[in-house]
Amino acid sequence: MGEQVQCPHCNKLVTLQFPLDSESNPTEQLGAYLAASAFPKNRDELRLLSKFISPTEIGKSSQLEYWHTIIKNPLDVIEQFLSGGFIQETNPDVSELLQCTKSGSELKALAKERGISESGSKQKLAERLVKADSAGMSELFQGRKFLTCSPKGGILADKFRES
């Protein structure tokens, strides 16, 4: 699932997906996947994977403390996701990072500091902030490493969220 394989008939690359049958529901499909896979093996690991649907920074200690209460060693699990091709390093644009890492009130405070309109959606605020202070917004994320689901990990994370 999530792997690209060559079709034996037409030789085109095909991404393996979960079956689209009406007989099984997403929870059953996910359970069958977990029973057959070497990794991930449980829903807690999939719950962690689903946190990488949008770009996520690893280094925050409060997040790691939380995950230690659920998974014995979350950093090892993240490393397995990386080596298994479920998550990957990403370099998203600054506007996307602002939307993923800042709350609406934090974005409004940044806008107020720069004397620009504080109204609108998070997306609009982020775009306005980047336009008004591109260098300043980029500095907020310098030296930070962000990870996100690969296409393979995204399929699995989406199925987990669906179930």
Image (spheres, rainbow, N blue to C red):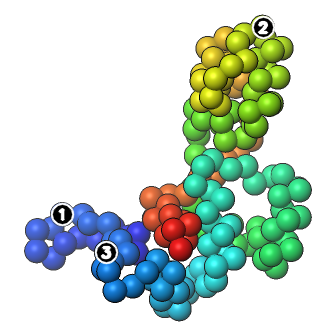
Residue 122 lies left or right of residue 71; in this view the side is left
Place residue 8 in its image quadrant: bottom left
Residue under circle 2? 115
Mark 2 and mark 1 residues within 8 Å of each other at the beta carbon: no
Q: Residue at x 84, y 52 (%)?
A: 60
| Residue 18 x %, y % | 37, 75
Residue 12 is labelled as: 1
Which of marks 2 and 3 precedes in the sequence?
A: 3
Q: Secondary structure at mark 1?
A: loop
Residue 20 is labelled as: 3
Place residue 72 in its image quadrant: bottom right
Residue situated furthest top in the rendering:
115
Tell me the kind of residue under disc 2.
Answer: Gly
| Residue 39 x %, y % | 58, 81
Q: Nearer the viewer, residue 96 or 123?
A: 123
Vertical relation: 13 (above or below) 137: below
Q: Residues within 10 Å of mark 2 (few under 14, many from 20)?
A: few
Q: CA distance from mark 1 to mark 3?
A: 21 Å
Q: Residue at x 66, y 75 (%)?
A: 45
- Residue 85 shows in this picture: no
| Residue 154 x %, y % | 50, 61
Q: Residue at x 62, y 57 (%)?
A: 52
Residue situated furthest left in the rendering:
9
* Location of the N terminus (image quadrant): bottom left
Q: Nearer the viewer, residue 101 or 139?
A: 101
